[in-house]
């Protein structure tokens, strides 16, 4: 016997809209079971995980700090995914953006000028875009699979960062800690409000999301993205170039990931260190799909996934559970989102294989 | 159930044919793809199945191989009626099939590919050994450890044949086997078929190449529009008489004013050759054509003879290297892309509606923009380089097209995928007509379209030419060709015949040209016929 997915004749519009919420509900149920198996009270644990972080002003700021890179990366990825280009290496582009954006403050710590911050942001974007340009070049020139190349480039970027902060960029007065000097005040991304740590990064994220939503909905460019993503042949008939679209989508998503990287370093960390991201570049893939690849939806899903990071920290403190729980929740969300979407479009059918049937007859 | 065993010609079943089919019918909705087909295949016989595309050949063999279930009629195997619920059961009976498009995994070796279709318990070494033996014995040399990706198309076909032979079939079905082969490879295949015949096995040979059929087949069954139009010994027939059975004898009525004055040459193709892009594509060989204002050039031919490749070259979806190879309104455009050619006043309608001419999941208005985002930039876009879509303008143009072509749809702006084939095709043709193109190139304008929509589309093409445009219609449907054409040329194996005025060409001559018989030969045959 084998299991087959059979395409449904019609797709329920209601379920398509409700699907992400359904996935979230199922994640909570699965999470409750997990807490119960760990010997914790499920309701209390879910409260600490998902509700408590929303009750304090400082932790709302933290939510914005964590949502900013997720949203910024995910809106770029949504354009990529919609155009059928699978950039899985945003984590690497984030890292390279953080490195190239930090060149100025690390090498010129005494440069006190208001232009340094805009320059850093531009260099961070360019770094991320160029790094995403590598898989784009490989794909357009050699037809290489961008999933593999962009993913492998993540590890190269991370190890390069590690080498930099342990080697040439290490702060000589830093007691041998593997990190650079703290950035000069002019090179730090300002906070939005006095009440907490949320910095301009979240503003960049919201602006990028709205701009890309506008592009996808009202501009010819967005139309090209959708057409080439659904049928390259129809795109060719329309006179749109699939090659140019590879470049456009990869450079765009790489640039936004790079901007997220430099914003993280210049905003929340203030110096460069070996680990600058708890996997934002990978989590952003979940954010993009949970937001239905719609930039406005991604704003909402970005905050939801940011909450899993915060909840993980809270659970570690109050419930003494490993912060790996946040990874579990992220995995559960992706699993349920994808399976809800699949089951909306397909029904499961159990088919007995012909040979088994024939043997049974004989 | 009858089990496939060793092949023996002797025995009590001698009197009954190996395979006998009576009144076999397959309905798709109300459309009869096969209509009460009778067919007998004797032991040790090479039996040809002839017919144009859409004649029902594929449907018939799919029923024989258990891929489709007949709506009515019976299949008898060695005198006993059988039901063939699946290809596995067909193999057990002793029917092997070699498909036109291969089902091979490129990354696996020859032996591994063969193992996939056999009993999973057989060890790979044994399969490799048998493969080597069988392939040598039948003159189909194959290295069992070679990777499929490294093999030529002819060698890949050998794998399919050997795979079928390893199951010791009594009947082998070959679907257009020579369409992918070089003449030398085809020669070897014929030798193999003769050897199979000598062993008492039977072959059902599907083809539209008349010379081949005459050369190797003992008997032929000819299909047209899902019905048997002839059963004969091909060696007793002339290519002309076979062609007549294949394309029908009814005389097409040409309802055109032949006195239409023709204007300037609007499309010209000069000696264009294009290498094939994929193993299954056809190379274009030295194609030349001219179409004048007011003229409809119809290009006839059996599918897969270079029609799509010709369309790609003329539309500019795949520009060619020789810029002077194609002229549109006198301007060389060979290297120009599709939108550049549209700006010169050309319009294009590809064969495949879903995923080529239209994106199924997108609404009609988006599909209108698909073909006209560049040529109607002023009307549909604003904001200069930003390219902001003017939804209202696009929607009203889409409405205009729907009412002009009588596109029946549910809702204001439904997705292309929700329309029936005929209505979507009317929209796709209307999308181009709405621009009043001076040149229109259409590939298979009414393929899979209901009769009402088809006649509306054909009328629109004739009217467009009357208004002074040059129209190229690529079609497999001869009735359609005679209905719309002022000039007819035939494409076969990537070569285009000379153009003939529509009134002077008979169905028989077209049939011969489609069958790959050279022009001079065709001329002689028709001279005899008159």
Image (cartoon, grey):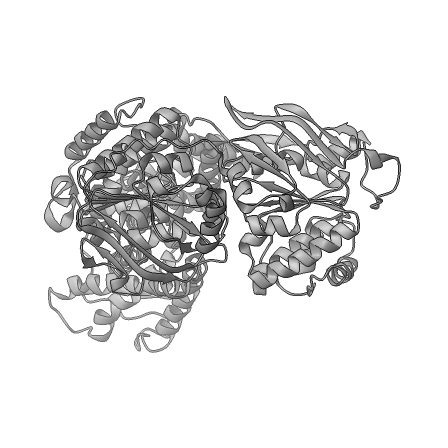
Q: Nearer the viewer, residue A315 or B17?
A: B17
- Residue B530 shown left or right of residue B261 in the figure: right
Q: Pick the residue in front: B523 or A182.
A: B523
Residue B129 position, x and y percent, is 78, 62
Name the image quarter holding residue A119: bottom left
Residue located at (21% from left, 71% from top): A104
Regarding residue B514, the answer to whether it shows in the image is no
Q: Is residue B299 visible?
A: yes
Which residue occupies 47% across, 50% down? Answer: B522
Q: Position of residue B55 (x, y in %)?
A: 52, 35
Q: Can you tell which quarter of the image residue B170 is in?
A: top right
Q: Residue B438, relative to residue B269: is it above or below?
A: above
Name the residue located 40 percent from the left edge and 43 percent from the top edge: A308
Q: Position of residue A78 (x, y in %)?
A: 33, 46
Image quarter (top left, top right, bottom left or bottom right) of the N terminus of chain B: top right
Asked whether B46 or B179 is in front, the reply is B46
């Amino acid at each position: 016997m084998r299991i087959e997915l059979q395409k449904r004749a019609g797709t329920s519009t209601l379920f398509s809209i409700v699907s992400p919420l359904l996935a979230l509900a199922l994640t909570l149920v699965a999470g409750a079971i997990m807490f119960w198996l760990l010997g914790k009270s499920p309701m209390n644990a879910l409260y600490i995980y998902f509700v408590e972080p929303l009750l304090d002003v400082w932790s709302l700021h933290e939510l914005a700090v964590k949502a900013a890179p997720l949203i910024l990366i995910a809106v770029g990825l949504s354009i990529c995914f919609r155009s059928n280009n699978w950039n899985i290496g945003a984590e690497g582009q984030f890292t390279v953006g953080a490195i190239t954006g930090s060149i100025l403050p690390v090498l010129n710590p005494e440069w006190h000028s208001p232009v340094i911050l805009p320059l850093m942001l531009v260099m961070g974007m360019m770094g991320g875009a160029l790094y995403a340009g590598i898989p784009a070049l490989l794909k357009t020139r050699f037809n290489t699979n961008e999933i593999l190349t962009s993913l492998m480039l993540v590890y190269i970027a991370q190890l390069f960062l590690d080498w930099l902060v342990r080697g040439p960029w290490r702060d000589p007065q830093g007691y041998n800690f593997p990190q650079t000097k703290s950035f000069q005040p002019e090179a730090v991304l300002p906070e939005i409000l006095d009440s907490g740590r949320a910095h301009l990064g979240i503003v960049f994220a919201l602006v990028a999301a709205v701009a890309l939503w506008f592009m996808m909905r009202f501009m010819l460019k967005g139309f090209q993205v959708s057409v080439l993503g659904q049928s390259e042949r129809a795109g060719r008939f329309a006179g749109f170039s699939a090659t140019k679209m590879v470049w456009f989508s990869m450079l765009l998503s790489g640039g936004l990931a790079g901007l997220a990287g430099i914003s993280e370093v210049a905003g929340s960390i203030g110096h460069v260190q070996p680990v600058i991201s708890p996997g934002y570049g990978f989590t952003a893939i979940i954010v993009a799909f949970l937001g239905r690849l719609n930039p406005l939806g991604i704003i909402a899903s970005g905050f939801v996934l940011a909450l899993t990071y915060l909840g993980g920290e809270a659970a570690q403190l109050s419930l003494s559970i490993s912060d790996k729980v946040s990874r579990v929740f992220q995995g559960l969300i992706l699993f349920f989102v994808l399976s809800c979407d699949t089951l909306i479009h397909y029904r499961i059918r159990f088919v007995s294989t012909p040979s088994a049937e024939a043997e049974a007859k004989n | 159930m009858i089990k496939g065993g060793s092949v023996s010609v002797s025995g009590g079943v001698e009197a009954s044919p190996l395979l006998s089919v009576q009144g076999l019918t397959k309905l798709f909705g109300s459309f009869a793809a096969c209509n009460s087909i009778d067919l007998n295949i004797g032991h040790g016989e090479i039996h040809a199945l002839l017919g144009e595309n859409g004649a029902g050949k594929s449907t018939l063999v799919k029923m024989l191989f258990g891929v489709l279930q007949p709506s009515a009629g019976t299949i008898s195997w060695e005198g006993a009626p059988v039901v063939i619920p699946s290809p596995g059961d067909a193999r057990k009976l002793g029917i092997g099939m070699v498909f036109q498009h291969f089902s091979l995994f490129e990354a696996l070796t020859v032996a591994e590919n063969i193992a996939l279709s056999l009993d999973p318990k057989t060890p790979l070494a044994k399969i490799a050994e048998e493969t080597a033996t069988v392939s040598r014995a039948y003159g189909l040399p194959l290295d069992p450890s070679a990777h499929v990706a490294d093999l030529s198309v002819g060698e890949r076909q050998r794998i399919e044949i050997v795979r079928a032979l390893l199951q010791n079939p009594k009947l082998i079905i070959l679907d257009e086997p020579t369409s992918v082969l070089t003449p030398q490879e085809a020669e070897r295949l014929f030798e193999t078929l003769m050897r199979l015949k000598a062993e008492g096995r039977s072959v059902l040979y599907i083809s539209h190449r008349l010379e081949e059929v005459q050369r190797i087949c003992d008997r032929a069954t000819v299909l047209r529009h899902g019905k048997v139009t002839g059963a004969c010994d091909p060696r007793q027939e002339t290519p002309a008489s076979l062609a007549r059975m294949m394309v029908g004898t009814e005389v097409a009525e040409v309802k055109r004013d032949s006195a239409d004055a023709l204007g300037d040459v609007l499309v010209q193709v000069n000696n264009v050759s294009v290498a094939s892009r994929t193993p299954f594509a056809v190379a274009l060989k030295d194609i030349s054509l001219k179409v004048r204002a007011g003229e409809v050039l119809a290009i006839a031919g059996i599918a897969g003879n270079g029609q799509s490749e010709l369309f790609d070259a003329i539309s500019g979806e795949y520009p060619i290297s020789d810029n002077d190879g194609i002229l549109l309104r006198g301007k060389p455009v060979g290297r120009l892309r599709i939108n550049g050619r549209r700006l010169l006043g050309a319009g294009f309608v590809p064969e495949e509606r879903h995923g080529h001419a239209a994106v199924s999941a997108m609404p009609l208005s988006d599909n209108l923009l698909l073909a006209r985002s560049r040529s109607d930039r002023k009307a549909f876009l604003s904001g200069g380089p930003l390219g902001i879509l003017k939804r209202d303008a696009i929607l009203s143009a889409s409405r205009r097209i729907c009412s002009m072509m009588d596109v029946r749809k549910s809702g204001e702006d439904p997705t292309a995928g929700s329309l029936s084939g005929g209505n979507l095709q009317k929209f796709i043709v209307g999308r181009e007509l709405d621009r009043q193109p001076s040149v229109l190139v259409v590939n298979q304008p009414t393929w899979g379209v209901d009769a009402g929509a088809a006649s509306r589309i054909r009328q629109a093409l004739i009217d467009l030419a009357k208004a002074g445009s040059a129209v190229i219609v690529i079609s497999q449907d001869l009735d359609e060709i005679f209905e719309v054409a002022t000039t007819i040329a035939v494409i076969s194996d990537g070569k285009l015949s000379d153009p003939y005025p529509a009134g002077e060409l008979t169905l028989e001559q077209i049939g011969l040209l489609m069958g790959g018989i050279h022009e001079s030969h065709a001329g002689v045959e028709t001279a005899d016929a008159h």
